[in-house]
Amino acid sequence: MDGGAFTTAFHLIVSLDPTLGGIVALSLRVTLTAVLVSCLIGLPVGAALAMGRFPGRSFVVVFFNALMGLPPVVAGLVVYLMLSRSGPLGDLGLLFTPTAMIVAQTALILPIVVSLTRQVVEDLWKEYEEQLRSLGATSMRAIPTLLWDGRFSLLTAVLAGFGRASAEVGAVLIVGGNIAGHTRTMTTAIALETARGDLALALGLGIILLAITLVLNAGAFFTGRLAQRASG
Amino acid sequence: MHGPLTILPLRVSGLGFVKGDKSLLDGVSFDLRHGERSVILGPNGAGKSLTLRLCHGLLKPNSGRIDWNGQAAAEGRRSHAMVFQRPVLLRRSAAANLTHALSLLDLPRRERKERARAALERFGLTELADRPARVLSGGEQQRLALARAWALRPQVLFLDEPTAALDPAATKAIEDAIQTFHREGVKIVMTTHDLGQAKRIADEVLFLHQGRLLEQTPAEEFFKAPRSPEAAAFLTGDLLW
Amino acid sequence: MTKLKHLMLAAAASLAATTGAASADDTYITVASTTSTEQSGLFDHILPAFEEETGIEVRVIAQGTGQALETGRRGDADVVFVHARPAEEEFVAEGYGVERHGVMYNDFIIVGPGSDPAGIAGTQEADEAFAAIAEAEAPFASRGDDSGTNQAELALWDSAGIAPSGGWYRELGSGMGPTLNTAAQMDAYTLADRGTWISFQNRGNLEILVEGDERLFNPYGVILVNPKRYPHVKTEKGQAFIDWLVSGEGQDAIASYKLDGEQLFFPSASDGES
């Protein structure tokens, strides 16, 4: 059966199966968009959390740390209840669309980006604070500098977020509905083929998912290392 | 180097700093005038670095005043720079470290580039401009920190044991750089452990001991005949740090 | 900072593209249906004909019957297409659905390990077979997910006069396929719909042991979600889908779906009753 899975995966790839192509494209679009949105929100929020001092800050820090362990199914359920026609945002009609999946995955990734950004920025600020303040930078003004200087550590945070989003099935299944050709991703397709008992196809899809994840991570890793070598 | 309006003299009066229930600095008063190289000496824990940080505005005193030419402290910030014992350089190229510092002054992009280029040249770092700052040697890093301070065109430069972590050759290069600042009219205020260095650089010495200023004396006189017994002990090596 | 600006533009464009696809083009309907219909491959077979004829895209969400009806109840689907008659009638009675139309049926089968420790092979009465399994305390895998199949299973236990419990009775809370996967691993009996069974590939030692009892009859109904309750329901297109399913054309399409040479679903719209 294992040989079957590799053969199946191989066949799917070399035959450029259009259904598979659509599934892969959708998976990447959803997850990469969720990663992008999480970074746009999470980097500044995480940095602000690192630099800011306000009452209840520790609570917010612990809250985001805890959310990193949020079960995807729970995130999916909450987003489902928000976006359902009977929910507060029902009028948008977003349930069972890729957008709903992006929202759910963003809810999963955002805590990772916020928490790790806060940690990275906090550590860098400890190192840089005197120097940057000596140069006349306020805390807020220092944020872009710290984010840029922490870029290699932050890349790891982003990859962790990507990994969590691309690997999860619970949230996208609930809010996307696993509609063929519309909201079916790699992971929900794997769940479906497993349910159908077609374990070879399921594993084949799993191998493809793993390969894509591997390629993306390797790309990020080596780009990061080259850039790091170039900038110290 | 300095604009038409000088921020000197620096008048420090009754400066006190408390951490927890420990008084680290108590009733320190002195005036620093333009033109002289002031070196702060004293054993470990005397409050030398603390005094520099307070003057530079990195810390707020618990008591006392710091006036720049009669103005309250915060005003003169951009007219004085500081170089630390361990240079903190950003994870980017040597040149980018300078342009970054200049961008915090809100200078136009072109002027940042020009000033950075000039500063690198001034301190013999032109060839290292594109190298990542973090992979430079300790001496190069400290020279880059000095170049960064120079690019800011300060009227006063604070240096906190700038050569403590360096070998003799690098130390020489840093001392030369400090003399460059001095020749260009920048007021030098530095701390050091190294009595030889203090003799080479100082025009006047401020001697701190256990958070108090015991004397402010012209250098020649200080090394010949210090006024306080603690300073005398310090010079003979009996007062260890 | 220009980099950041580019990133933000890209994000905005990407979001707009995805939402645009969701709201702007309104040529689709959402159908909440069951895992058994989806996993048997029926939709892949019949939907292209409908979509080509009407230009209406049918987006199928495959859930358990209970969950599919809940999706309809919350207004998140235009049409529900399920198999649990009493629950469907309740759905209509509560005002969530307009009217139930019988579409087709398939049948349930009792599958179990070839060794058949409870000795039920060839039994004519499904409830007798269930009683024998309980008697032997042979492992039984229940869907336990409030699906149509699960509800049919519970009805059979009820008619056998047994309230199943104990270590041999395992509620999995899973769809049909996962339940079959598990049953194959545990050498357990289970109630399955024939459609999923035929297309299921990971059977292990499992075999059909009991079939043909009319209590194993499994009717499918289709219901338009009530637009009076949810004004956004695509009444016209949803109704078009229902009309097509019960039309000669739709019924022929259903009858023509064969897997491994076996017909899985039997049209029943003309029966009037189911």
Image (cartoon, coloured by chain):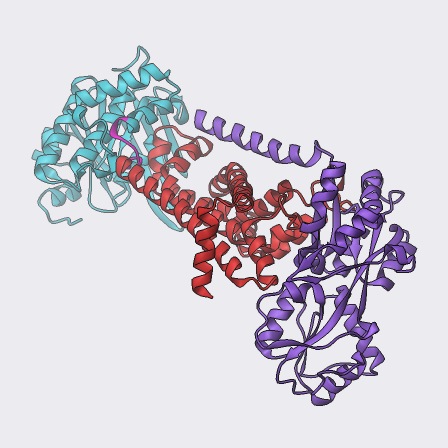
Chain colours: A red, B cyan, C purple
The quadrant in which the N terminus of chain C is found is: top left
Q: Is residue C274 above or below residue A48?
A: below
* Image quadrant occupied by the C terminus of chain C: bottom right
Tell me where residue A104 appears, x and y as whole percent: 61, 47
Q: Residue at x 25, y 47 (%)?
A: B45
Question: Which stretch did the figure color magenta?
Answer: B88-95
Left or right, B28 with respect to C41, comes to left
Asked if residue A6 is among those painted magenta in the image, a careful observer would answer no
> With respect to residue A10, does B10 lie above or below?
above
Q: Nearer the viewer, residue C172 or A12?
A: A12
In the visual, does A102 lie left or right of C124? left
- Residue B90: within the magenta? yes
Residue at (22% x, 46% y) in the render: B44
- Total marks in image: 0
**Residue farthest to the bottom, as pictured:** C136
Examine the rendering and report whether any part of residue C232 can be seen.
Answer: no
**Residue B113 visible in image:** yes
Indicate whether B111 appears above or below C110: above
Q: In the current view of this chain or complex, which residue is farthest to the front?
A: C261
Left or right relative to B224: residue B136: right
Residue B122: name its quadrant. Answer: top left
Residue at the farthest top position:
B4
Q: Based on the displayed image, in which of its 4 quarters is residue C266 positioned?
A: bottom right
Percent coordinates x, y for residue C171 in the rendering: 68, 73
Percent position of residue C244, x then y: 82, 45
Q: Which residue corresponds to the image point at 65% horizontal and 82% vertical from the top-left? A: C139
User: Where does the image place residue C47, in percent across and percent down from the top left?
Assistant: 71, 46
Q: Which of these two is toward me, A152 or B238?
A: A152
Q: Main secondary structure of the magenta part?
A: loop
Closer-to-camera residue (B165/B20): B165
